[in-house]
Image (cartoon, grey):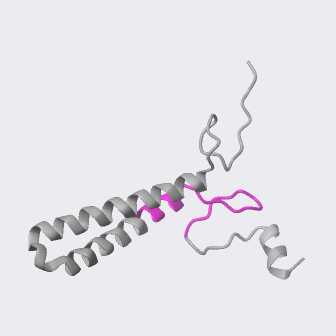
Amino acid sequence: MIPHITNPTVGHMNSSISRQTRALWQLAVAAIVSAAVGAAGVLVWLGWHAILVSVMAGVALAVAVVRFVTWLQYRSGVYRCRFCQRPLRRPGAACDCPGVQAAREGR
């Protein structure tokens, strides 16, 4: 049996979609669904005269869900350093590998 060599940026062995692309789609779907559910829930609760409030509630719920999904994705190691492939632990956090250091210095 020939062992499978996988690319660390690809989500599954037989998938050609990268982890980052899959994570982006997860965020987009989570935002759209949570915004619609939040807006519809508040709209049903308050009635048609509160359309602006229901839209704001939907957006607030979408922001909360996207932050939570992003946190889960970083904690599970979806986003990785492009130089050494170590998982990044939070948004905006830079890896301390030599490749990042060289890129910062402009080499």
Determine the residue positioned at 86% across, 80% down. Answer: 106
Quadrant where the N terminus sits is top right
Residue nearest the viewer, comparing 74 with 41: 41
Q: Taking 11 as reference, is 26 above or below it?
A: below
Would residue 98 be counted in the magenta stretch?
no
Q: Residue 99: percent from the left, percent from the top?
A: 81, 68
Quadrant where the C terminus sits is bottom right
Left or right of residue 16, residue 74 in this image: left
Which of the 4 quarters of the picture holds residue 21? Answer: bottom right
Q: Taking 74 as reference, is 43 above or below it?
A: below
Determine the residue positioned at 73% across, 27% down. Answer: 3
Left or right of residue 101, residue 44 in this image: left
Determine the residue positioned at 22% across, 80% down. Answer: 52
Principal secondary structure, stretch drawn in magenta: loop
Left or right of residue 88, residue 50 in this image: left
Would residue 83 be counted in the magenta stretch?
yes
Q: Taking 24 as reference, is 39 above or below it?
A: below
The part of the chain drawn in magenta is: 68-90
Residue placed furthest toward the right: 107
Q: Residue 36: percent from the left, percent from the top?
A: 28, 63
Q: Residue 76: percent from the left, percent from the top?
A: 52, 54
